Amino acid sequence: MIPRRFRNWIIFWTIIVWCVLELLTYPKTVPITSGISEVIKGFFSASVGAYPAWVMLLLAVVCFAAGAVGLVRRSKAKSFNVLLLVEGAVFLAWGVLAGGGGVDGWSAAANNISYNWAIQTVVVILGGACVWLWAAGNPERAELTTWNTHQVWKLYRANWQGMVGLGILVVFILMALLAPFLADHALLDPNAQIKDPATGELFGPYHPPTTYYYNWFGTDQVGQSVLTQFIWSARISLMVGLLAAFMSTVLGAGIGIAAGFYGGWQGEGWMRLTDAFLVIPWLPLAMVLAAAWGQNYWMIILIIGITSWPGTARVIRSDVLRVRELSFIERAKAIGSSNRHIMTKHVLPNVMPLIFANLVLVVAIAILSETTLSFLGLGDPLNFSWGTMLHYAWVNGAAGLPAWWYLLPPGIAIILVVLAFTFIGTAYDEVLDPKLRKREDSTSESRFTSRGEPAIAVAGGAGVGGGGGIFTPGQQTDDAMPDFNKPAGGSIGRPEGGGWVGGHIADDEKEGK
Amino acid sequence: MDKRRYFIRKVLNAVLTIILVASFNFALFRILPGDPARLLLPKGKTDPSVIEKQRKTFNLDKPMWQQFVYYWRDTVRGEFGMSFSEKRPVTEVVAERIWPTVLLVGVGTVFATVVGMIMGVFAGWRRNGTYDIVSTNLGMVLYAMPTFWFGLLMIMLFATKLRWFPTGRMEEPGVELSGFASFQSLMKHLFLPAFTFAIAYVGEYHLIMRSSITGVMKEDFALTARAKGLSENAVLWRHVVPNAMLPTVTIVMMNLGFVMSGAILAESVFNWPGLGLLSYDSMQKRDYPVMQAVFLIASIAVIVANLIADIMYYYLDPRVQA
């Protein structure tokens, strides 16, 4: 039997995921003003669930691999693995359907599959069922996960900063998802100028805000609605930030674990690579890459992903170095576990919370990075993001007018979103590390280690000696978090800051011994 | 650790990293999609014979390892080829842009360090007081703020609305000034870019200094100083601050290496004719030889700044010497 709370979560999140996917692919051509029946029809139109075929094929491969590995290794939840294979088959069929339309038919939209929404619904429900079966097959782990998550949430809820951050984020995410209903996408057309309904005349370029909805934020240099741009920009800014941060964290965590776990030349090699990447100035490199690789937001995601991982790698590595010395690793080694087994079953679960906290903070950095690149004119010219808006405001001289209504909204939105992610990361970090919750008493201990190393060296190197968290034994997150009490940025930096590259001082923890 | 060994190790490390980064620079401009010979020429239609000639001049017709050797020879000599947007040697183009950047970055860094640290000292000293809460939240906002956006706001407010400062450039075009007047004009032009450049760092240094002060205040020697009956001011400025400066100074030094990114943004917004504006312009014109040179300079700056920070730390913190 699966825990009741776990079951509720599955139902809740399945519905949420379904709603998000539906809204994300809701047709841009059907605004809410086109009537209730049109809107309802919109949810079942060809564009809903029309992803590129490679996404579905990729997901199919992932499902097949996970299911097959589970079956071969005779995991406890057999039905879960079988269902994973079924899910993979659905993805495969979907991908083939979407990709089968010839040369440029590599998306479901191009092939005009009008029942994508139905396949998507099936896929989401199957996904929920997979988790259900997993929980049924591993009842004690499901119980533990439920309990842990509930405890974390209870602690998190008590942190007002974290809740404020979450609140801001939810508002912006809702704005991004509901964009088709909040603002007509047709108004982003290069020639779409907005009219004053009172007089029936065009507002014209750089009209200050009025009470008319689409003119709340005034107009831009060609008389377009700034509000519309603002609302649709939220999608690109958030999506690029989230995906780029995800990519960067996966890369950084992988390299960090490899660098920390392997001693000798392998670990040293990964560390040298990280160090070399860490000193390459981020913005010039990203500019070169963006200038050469062309301008669409997938490229921006790729560029931010492959240039911003070294900070994460360093933080993760320092934690792995601590975990590596724990006795259960020694035990696993003694009974002859393979390196891969130890890394995936012992090291990874122990550094996972840190990876997650790091991910949240990297999102903030990635959003700033995207904004910076777009501001310099390297963004996607077809899709607005807040950075692109600022770029247009800049090159068209909004600051010289001064057209404050064009400059303020995107900038304030960026600050709010970045702050929200920082707050969430910090709050989560405090939840994980009880030492930080009572930091008033503990800061002095964490400044210097017993070995007398400077605190800076500690930040980039080995842990301070373990925090002794409740949920993740010995979780040590001191060096990852920019918060009120520690150097901002940790090893992660602002796009133009390079951040606090701790650890370069004493090179690495070996120095201190 | 032995002083000689420590220094030799640090310097060797830096040299090794420079070699790595310079090799990466070589690779970067060759893994870019497209023919490198084509990349090194202006966009648009080009005569095949010109491309052939370009291939010869940059030794792109040679095998890769020979190219690598040539690249190193040229880099060591300080030759980076010709800028095709300005039709001059890259070295020349870059050289005249260095000083404006050094000026901007120098003034900005000094400002950010002094203001950020002083703000942080008081915040850490009166922890959780009204000033602390206000200034720390302000620091967070400054840290989360895109620099260029702040720059645009500055232009809007101080250059367009109030007309206190010019909107950009280093001097008025077509106006010849001499002596004090030219200095005055330079300062007027410098103020907004330097302030914009500094503002993100103010937030960062404030937060670092605050946490550092809080940490040091809990140390035994601070308690001893109080117990001796020293005044609060003496405890703060004689005992706590000097010790708390250590991490901040190091981070300031290390950030010096990364100023290039901040300079790119501040300089492009304010048209300040430094390396940052140069890299923005060359990016727009796809002037790869210049980009390559700027990229190398920026990377080496980081490594050298880190090296200096290491060496400074040796003298500042006796614990490293032990």
Image (cartoon, rainbow, N blue to C red):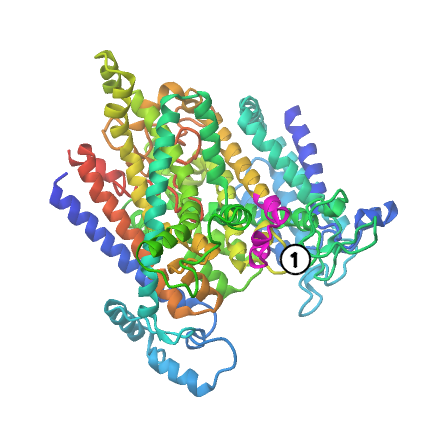
Most common secondary structure along the magenta stretch: helix
Does the segment drawn in magenta span residue A394?
yes
Is B296 positioned to the left or the right of A382 in the image?
A: left
In this picture, residue B137 sits left or right of residue A1: left
Q: Position of residue A440 (x, y in %)?
A: 39, 20
**Where residue A125 sits: x, y (%)?**
71, 41
Q: Can the viewer see residue A321?
A: no
Task: Say which chain tag 1 marks.
Answer: A
Residue at the spot 46% in from the left edge and 50% down from the top edge: B165
Confirm whether residue A7 shows in the render.
Answer: yes
State which quadrant residue A466 falls in. top left
Residue B34 pos. (x, y %): 47, 73
Instruction: Please give left or right for residue A359 compared with residue A36 in the image.
Output: left
Q: Looking at this view, is B68 or B270 the one in front? A: B270
Magenta range is: A391-411
**Residue A242 image position (x, y, % from top left):** 56, 45
Q: Magenta includes A430?
A: no
**Quarter of the image that includes the C terminus of chain A:** top left
Q: Residues within 10 Å of mark 1 (few under 14, many from 20)?
A: some
Q: Quadrant of residue B237?
A: top left
User: Considering the image in quadrants, where does the N terminus of chain A appear?
Assistant: top right
Return the residue nearer the eye: A301 or B238: B238
Pick the front one: B266 or A116? B266
Residue B315 occupies quadrant: top left
Which residue is label 1 attached to? Answer: A221
